[in-house]
Image (cartoon, rainbow, N blue to C red):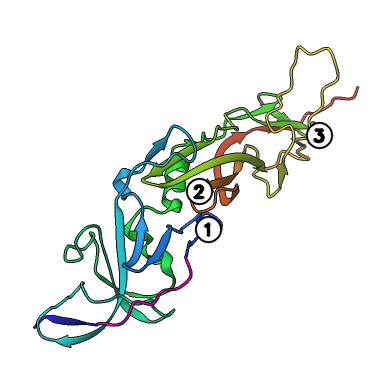
Amino acid sequence: MRRFISIAPTTVVLVLALSFAASGQDNEGDEGTNIEVTPSGLVVTAGTPGSLGLSPAPGRPGRGPTVYCGWYNFSVEFGEYLFDPIGDSIWPRVSSTYLLNCWTDDPAEPYPGYPKITRYRGAAEISGSAVSSGDAARFAIAHINFELPEIQLSPPRRQVVGVPSWLAVVSRLHYDQISANAGPVWATVQARMRDVTWDFGNGESRVCRDDVSKVWDPTANQIQTSRCTYTYINSSGSPFNVTATVRWNIWQRTNTNPSWHWWGTISRSTTIPVRVTQLQSAIR
């Protein structure tokens, strides 16, 4: 006994010209693929996931297939499986259930993964049939290769109770923008160092936005200062596990939104043991 799906033909509903753009949610990026309603149906022009690659210049699209998609009313009965992709698609209603089919050249040869039953939540659902600008942004971010923080404290060895410890991250913190594309879909991302959060292993922490890479120079003949320091008030519990977490704000430009806009935050952390010494004075 097999599933039977029959298509209920309806009239194509034409609406205003559509372009579904950025969601802008943290760590999500753009999800919209350019979708156009035409007299012949719903058209998505995009590259396939396998065609994603780094782009030598921002906004330089490549060549990709045209993917056609449509939502269809259906009923489920017992009997022979039947799917007639030639029937007229409809413009679906939010939260209603439809059969979604996508294809490149022949409706009788569906795009991989289609047709599928879906509850309509917005046209961006069909981005799974092709690369979205969000896919391109994530591909580019994955190729930034953020370094783990390299921690350097001053004094360079043991820290001393009552003496300010200079806190520095001496690994790479600044990166060039990077672009990726698949077909006409593209994204350029830029990582901007936001701050460094220090956890001192004793229940205290602080956030540094200035002098995050400044290291004390023992050869300098002038007064030195840093705005990223911490002073231990006791050595109980030493050595402490000190963690530095670097955060970068990620901004993006895409084919769906060519102005710089928010993508989310990326962070990397490193933990090292730090020995703190209590100096003793002798009075005679």
x 48%, y 61%: residue: 19
- Identify the disc placed on residue 22: 1
The amino acid at mark 2 is Thr
Q: Earlier in the sequence, mark 3 or mark 2?
A: 3
Give neighbour class at mark 1: few <14, some 14-19, many 20+ (Cα, 10 Å): many
Judged by depth in the image, the label closer to the viewer, 3 or 2, is 2
The amino acid at mark 3 is Gly
x 91%, y 22%: residue: 284
Q: Which one is in front, 177 or 86?
A: 86
For the magenta stretch, what is the residue range?
Answer: 9-17
The residue indicated by pointer 3 is: 162
Q: Residue furthest front?
A: 39
- Identify the disc placed on residue 254: 2
| Image location (x, y in percent) of residue 23 | 53, 61
Q: Which one is in front, 129 or 176?
A: 129
Please tell me in which quadrant of the rendered image residue 168 appears. Answer: top right
* Most frequent secondary structure within the magenta stretch: loop
